[in-house]
Image (cartoon, coloured by chain):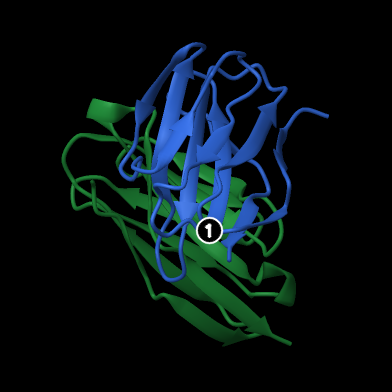
Amino acid sequence: DGGITQSPKYLFRKEGQNVTLSCEQNLNHDAMYWYRQDPGQGLRLIYYSQIVNDFQKGDIAEGYSVSREKKESFPLTVTSAQKNPTAFYLCASLPRGVLSTEAFFGQGTRLTVV
Amino acid sequence: ILNVEQSPQSLHVQEGDSTNFTCSFPSSNFYALHWYRWETAKSPEALFVMTLNGDEKKKGQISATLNTKEGYSYLYIKGSQPEDSATYLCAYRDANTGNQFYFGTGTSLTVIP
């Protein structure tokens, strides 16, 4: 079945450690996105990529890094520079250049930093 | 950052009640408006993609309308069932940044049996 897989579902890390969240899609979509959700807030864009080997910062990119070496994969690294990393992270993908199509989402990763 | 607002933030209704909620977005540079249904521990599921002013879409007992000139969309659920309990998200896409989604905070619906 085509879809987006995020792993792990729950992740615990010690403060000061970098951690990488996985996002893989087999939908052949060009564009991929990372969002963060905090209680009482909407999904906020961290990074997005429209094509392999290219990505752009979203609204809250500080303390995060990404790579897009393969079309299928868009991992997100939460670095020690991110001041409040505990949050719910959601990955999405979209075919590039299609107006009316929907985005597809993973099930999310809940990161807790202790 | 574009401002997309949803109201109410949460809603509790009795089974069989009809309900509606609102998504407000910037009225200039409209590109598309999406509605998603998000159940706990699952991926958001697409309900509607709306692109034209005056659009009305329907899926079962759920329908949506779009007014791009005044910058709002309504989602209606007729005869709510407990399985309709979820968070309903709207996402706005702007003509200047077409593939970026700007999400509202969602409306959390609980249907009481």
Which quadrant of the figure contains the C terminus of chain A? bottom right
Q: Circle 1 — which element?
A: loop
For residue A24, side relative to residue A76 (left or right): right
State the residue lying farthest toward the left: B28
The residue carrying mark 1 is: A15
* Residue at 73 percent of width and 70 percent of height: B83
Give the residue at x 54% y 36%.
Answer: A76
Q: Nearer the viewer, residue A99 or A19?
A: A19
Where is residue A98 shown, x and y percent of the image?
46, 20
- What colour is chain A? blue
Q: Is residue A109 left or right of residue A33?
A: right
A10 shown above or below A101:
below
Q: Quadrant of the N terminus of chain A?
A: top right
The colour of chain B is green
Instruction: State the residue in front, A40 or A99.
Output: A40
Q: Position of residue A84 (x, y in %)?
A: 42, 60
Q: Residues within 10 Å of mark 1 (few under 14, many from 20)?
A: some
Callout 1, which amino acid?
Glu
Quarter holding residue A28: top right
The x, y position of residue A99, in whole percent, is 42, 24
Residue B61 location, quadrant: bottom right
Chain at tag 1 = A
Task: Please state which of residues B50 and A49 is positioned toward the viewer in this rendering.
Answer: A49
Q: Give the quadrant of residue B101.
A: top left
Q: Is residue A87 left or right of residue A84?
A: right
